[in-house]
Image (tube, grey):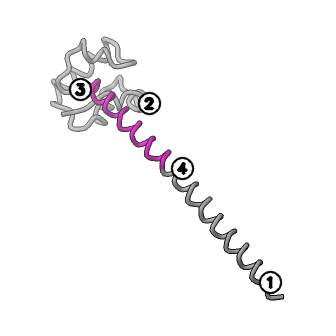
Amino acid sequence: MGFHKSCYFSSYKFFIKLLLLLILCCLSVCCGKKQSKQVLSTENQVIVSETVININTAPIVELEKIPNIGAKTARAIIEHREKFGKFRKPEHLMFVARISDKRFREIKHLIKAE
């Protein structure tokens, strides 16, 4: 009977070690994927930040480059800026009559207020 007990315990220890190894492998794969996503998102931020338009200094031509902003809306932005002063936050662009909440959400990553 002593033989069966020691055989049972050694296979139990082997199973535990194997299970721990499997868990460590899964964790390392999961962590590796998260790191690559972080690098990708950082790269995307750099690309977006190069094309960001300052709504406080941009002329009409530059404002028209923003998607869904035509000549009338660009003029409305400039008129608002001249009447009330600089935008303190990008969100303040929604005070312009032609900029809805939906339109702002579509363009907020392309603008800044400095």
Q: Quadrant of the N terminus?
A: bottom right
Q: Is residue 61 above or below residue 32?
A: above
Is 30 on the left or on the right of 62, as rendered? right
Identify residue for label 1: 3
Disc marking residue 31: none
Identify residue for label 2: 102
Is 56 on the left or on the right of 29, as rendered? left
Which of the two residues, 43 or 64, is positioned nearer the viewer here?
43
Rounded to the nearest angstrom, the CA distance separating label 3 from label 2 is 18 Å
Kind of residue sitting beneath label 4? Val
Which of the two residues, 82 or 19, is positioned nearer the viewer here?
19
Q: Position of residue 109 (x, y in %)?
A: 35, 31
Q: Is residue 43 above or below residue 63?
A: below
Density class for disc 1 (Cα within 10 Å; few <14, some 14-19, many ≥20) is few
Density class for disc 3 (Cα within 10 Å; few <14, some 14-19, many ≥20) is many
Q: Position of residue 107 (x, y in %)?
A: 37, 27
Which of the two residues, 16 or 39, is positioned nearer the viewer here?
16
Rounded to the nearest angstrom, the CA distance separating label 2 from label 4 is 38 Å
Is 105 on the left or on the right of 85, as rendered? right
Q: Is residue 74 above or below residue 110?
A: above
Kind of residue sitting beneath label 3? Ile
Sequence-wise, the earlier of marks 3 and 2 is 3
Identify residue for label 4: 29
Kind of residue sitting beneath label 2? Lys
Rounded to the nearest angstrom, the CA distance separating label 3 from label 4 is 43 Å
The residue depicted at 26 percent of the width and 22 percent of the height is: 77
The residue depicted at 21 percent of the width and 20 percent of the height is: 78
Q: Is residue 44 magenta?
A: yes
Q: In the image, which is nearer the foreground, mark 4 or mark 1?
A: 1
Identify residue for label 3: 55
Magenta span covers which residues?
32-53
Residue 90: image quadrant is top left
